[in-house]
Each structure stands twice: as C-alpha cells, then as structure tokens.
Image: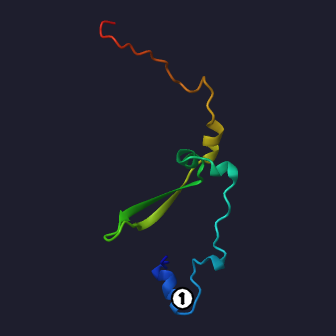
Amino acid sequence: MQEWICHTCDSHLIKGGMPSIAVANSLELAPIPPELDELNVLERQLIVKILPFAKIVALPKGRQRAVHGAVVCVPSEVETMVNSLPRSSAKVQLLQVKLKRKIEY
C-alpha cells in the first residue's frame, strides 16, 4: 500500500523541521462523547456552536475538493434551540388533513 504526504508537511520534513500540523505538536482531536456520536447530520447541525461557510471547488485533476477563499465562521445561538426542543404538541402548529381519493367527493 502506498502512503501519501501533503506538500506542506513534505517541505517541512525536507528542511528537517516538524510540520506545524503534526500530531506530535499536540494537535489531536478530543474524543467524541457517546451521546453525541450517535447523532445524525441534521441533529449535529442543530447543536453546533459555530457554522462555518466556505466555497468548496473541485480541483482540475482527480476527485479532490479544495476550499477557495476565506472561511467565515458564524456563531449560532444554541441556547434558544436547546430550550425550544422538544416542542410540546400545543406549539407544533400542525393541522391534521384527511385526503380523499375519489373525485366525486
């Protein structure tokens, strides 16, 4: 199996230095709690504290993607979302509709 290294890390290693984004620089991700690990994509987006917006473009060769331009991070108000969920049946504001199948009705 062939392994690949990015150009940034390669240039640091050729110069004899440590890449700034290496795991050796304590850049590990914290473990995800089991309660949050079972959430689906929509649930994760509802509780996220910061919403990142970026322009993602397809690179000319291969099937890779790249971020073009600046990434804008918009803070979200999680408190209001958490306090409003789950909604009570009185606040749902749904109407029950019975559809009729025959045209004569």
How far from the left and from the top, in percent, is residue 96? 49, 18
How far from the left and from the top, in percent, is residue 2? 48, 78
Frontmost residue, 69 versus 28: 28
Rendered image quadrant of residue 20: bottom right
How far from the left and from the top, in percent, is residue 85? 62, 36
Q: Residue at x 69, y 51 (%)?
A: 34
Q: Residue at x 64, y 70 (%)?
A: 28
**Which residue in the structure is indicated by mark 1?**
13
Q: Residue at x 30, y 10 (%)?
A: 103
Say if 63 sits above or below 93 in the image.
Answer: below
- Name the outermost residue toward the bottom: 15
86 lies left or right of 65:
right
**Number of numbered callouts drawn:** 1
Say if 102 sits above or below 77 in the image.
Answer: above
Frontmost residue, 70 versus 28: 28
> In which quadrant is the C terminus drawn?
top left
Rendered image quadrant of residue 55: bottom left
Mark 1 crowd level (few <14, some 14–19, many ≥20, 10 Å Cα): few
In the structure shown, which secondary structural element does the residue marked by tag 1 occupy? helix
By what rule are the colours in the image chosen? rainbow
Q: Residue at x 54, y 88 (%)?
A: 13
- Name the outermost residue toward the front: 1
